[in-house]
Image (cartoon, helix red, strand yellow):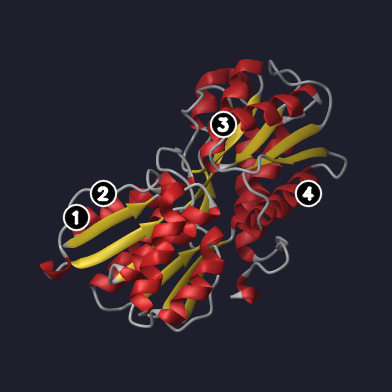
Amino acid sequence: MRKLIVALIISLVSVSSMFASGTNEKTVSEDSGKTRVCVVYTGNLGDKSYNDSCNIGSQRALEEFDIELKSLEGSTNDEWKSNLLSACEDGYDLVICAASNLQPYLEEFAPMYPDVKFAIIDTTVNEPNVQSISFAQNQGSFLAGAAAAMFTEKSDISGINDEAVIGWVGGMDIPVLQDFYTGYEQGAKYVNPNVTILKAFAGSWNDPLKGKELALAQYEQGADIVMNVASGTGPGILEAAKESGKYAIGVDLNQDNDQPGSVLTSMVKRVDTACYLTIKSVVEGTYKGGTTSYLTLADGGVSLTDFSVMRNALGDKFPEDIVEKCSVINDKIISGEIVVENYEGFGPSAN
């Protein structure tokens, strides 16, 4: 009876999402003997950011291990819930929830499917069959904010005005992005307590036009540089920087070459590593449900890129002091001399 009810729910909910899900190669039947893995996304692949980073990790696992891999993509709450429920019902050995938007659905479904191993990235779900992986994005963003605050003072560089104004554009207004912003603001004010920070949310992970519009508005308000924290919305932010003769900071993956000469650096978040290691733990029998991981600067979970693309673009005008100061700040965070604040509910104490 439960399977009939669930099937009806999936059928009803997924009418609007039937074209939103995708399947990776090497899909085989349940009785193949392979470890069966499904990754549920809250956005689309091809974002050159968060989702693509997670996919890089799963594709690495696909190459190295004898697994079946399926990817389910979706852009709305109904699609996310339907895709997760479908993955639960299809008997996968491991279901990875790629982002924190799936938290309420995983909290609902994990107790209903005790034999399924789950993982969730970017938040914590306290269930015995869920492995949670979070990141110290606040630490990486502290470095990004510090770099932005230093860069906005370099008025001898084309596109930099005399005002100490920087920007930040996020995708959806969710706690994990607030944690990004908390670190960004603290890092910027560590460098210059009087810096002005413009903040906006696009309300979507898949709207590059909205991202571009918000970034352009911040540039018009005096920002020289805007941090992109918006997944598939982010390419529009980087385009706005290029078109305005301004600058941006990338996120999740190395986006320095997406608009060469317009991206100062990127705050890399190793979602790929989290996804890969989770699959590896199931394949090798070391998976432990009911556990949490919190990956910091010291762990290599987050970092800035090396500024090399901007160095090439600016040549002798590139401000090397930014690299040197960021390196010093990085070491101070790792040593504990600088304590980066978390948004409420985040950080090691929350795990």
**Mark 1 or mark 4, which has the lower sequence index?**
1
Give the residue pinned by disc 2. Answer: 24
Amino acid type at mark 2: Asn
Give the residue pinned by disc 3. Answer: 208
Q: Is residue 327 above or below residue 108?
A: above
Residue located at (28% from left, 51% from top): 59
Amino acid type at mark 1: Thr
* Closer to viewer: mark 2 or mark 4: 2
Which residue reaches farthest left? Answer: 32
The kind of secondary structure element at disc 4 is: helix
Q: CA distance from mark 1 to mark 3?
A: 31 Å
Circle 4 packing at 10 Å, graded few (<14), some (14-19), many (20+), is some
The kind of secondary structure element at disc 2 is: loop
Residue 157 position, x and y percent, is 69, 18
Q: CA distance from mark 2 to mark 1?
A: 7 Å
Residue 18 position, x and y percent, is 38, 48
Circle 3 packing at 10 Å, graded few (<14), some (14-19), many (20+), is many
Query: Taking 341 as reference, is 307 left or right?
Result: left
**Mark 1 or mark 3, which has the lower sequence index?**
1
Residue located at (35% from left, 73% from top): 4
Residue located at (59% from left, 28% from top): 209
In contact (CB < 8 Å): disc 3 and disc 4 = no
Q: Is residue 76 above or below residue 112?
A: above
Circle 2 packing at 10 Å, graded few (<14), some (14-19), many (20+), is some
Amino acid type at mark 3: Pro
Give the residue pinned by disc 4. Answer: 190
Residue 344 position, x and y percent, is 73, 66
Quick check: can you spot residue 203?
A: yes
Q: Is residue 151 above or below residue 304?
A: above
In contact (CB < 8 Å): disc 2 and disc 1 = yes
